[in-house]
Image (spheres, rainbow, N blue to C red):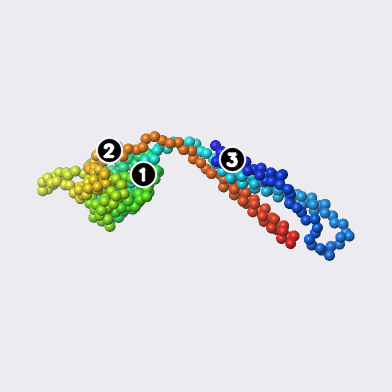
Amino acid sequence: MFDFAWPWMLLCSPFPWLIWRFMPPASGLTQGVLYAPFVDTSQPINTTKKILSSKKKISLRAWAGIICWVLLVLAIARPQWLGEVIELPESGRNLLLALDVSGSMEIADMDEGWSNRLDVVKQVAGEFVQRRNGDRIGLILFGSQAYLQAPLTFDHATVNTFLQETVIGIAGRETAIGDAIGMALKRLHNTSGDTVLILLTDGANNSGQVQPLKAAELAAQQNLRIYTIGVGGLPQQISGVFGTQMRNTASDLDEETLQAIADMTGGQYFRATDKKTLTDIYRQLDKLEPVPEGSRLVRPVTELYPWPLGISLILSFILAISSWKKESSHG
């Protein structure tokens, strides 16, 4: 629907007429100020046509001025187009997902050998993102270094798209846990509201510029709560030529450091050994960090004042140019 933000400004419309109606006219000159001896005053001058033409021009200019004023008043009243009412969830917390994309994430030990670790994480984490209505969600990818893949946003569909497009090794083949926490601190600096980081890895910190525990200490100072998730399958018995052997594909996982990071920041450490346990972990996170309840109604507003304002300025410019040309020709 169409509306005015400041409709009372329309009361300014009759101001020019009121000034013309009640203000005394400017005093005119009664005598000529320039004597032209070369003009033959004995010859009659046919001025009727010129006067009619002048009145016509003045009339057109007057109408143009009126249109300019009306458009200007309309612009001051701020015309708007109001869209349909939209129901939005109440704003929740700032939630960053830090995902390990190092080389070890290509191991297929969490889905009975059908999918590698990263594919399982993308599926489960993607469902988690879709459930977080009201939260601002961002995505950090880390390997040998950490970088921001998606900034904090309410556009969960885009975050999920970036998540599903993630490939192993895009940030290097090693693991920089400390740099991932440091990147989260940088992105959450000066943000208002509750801040949470969910860090998922399958290894130990062996790269980067910041030590994980030092980064966790800084996170605790800035009230950043960190939940850590360690992924990797359980040890398995493998029969071979030399008999049965134990194979531990998650031997590189530094659970002690992940537990310490969570404890220092008021979070919690989780261990995911397969797809089901990882799904259960994200369900627990939904309970630990519940999405806000309730909603608010908003109506999108499109401002229309630039149109009458722009037309008024263009018309005023044309009038000014015509006046200047007229004075130049008389001069």
Mark 3 lies on residue = 8
Indicate which label's residue lies in the foreground, 3 or 1: 3
| Res 200 seen here | no
Badge 2 or badge 3: first in the primary sequence: 3
**In whole angstroms, how far apart are the C-alphas of marks 3 and 1?**
38 Å
Residue found at x 22% / y 43%:
271
Q: Position of residue 55 (x, y in %)?
A: 76, 50
- Nearer to us of marks 2 and 3 is 3
Q: How many marks?
A: 3
Residue 260, numbered label = none
Residue placed under numbered mark 1 in the picture: 193
- At label 1, the amino acid type is Gly
Q: CA distance from mark 1 to mark 2?
A: 21 Å
Which class describes the residues within 10 Å of circle 3: few (<14), some (14-19), or many (20+)?
A: few
Would you identify the image quadrant in which residue 115 lies? top left
Residue closer to the observer: 195 or 84: 195
Residue 232 spot, x, y in % from top left = 22, 45
305 left or right of 323? left
Q: For the residue marked with disc 3, what is the amino acid? A: Trp
Residue behind mark 2: 284
Furthest toward the bottom, the residue is 38
Relative vertical location of residue 170 with respect to residue 237 in this rendering, above or below: below
**Of the residues under marks 3 and 1, which one precedes in the sequence?**
3
Tell which circle, 1 or 2, labels the residue nearer the N-terminal end.
1
Check disc 2: other Cα within 10 Å, few if <14, some if 14-19, many if 20+: few
Q: Say what secondary structure mark 2 lies in.
A: helix
Relative depth, front residue between 93 and 277? 93
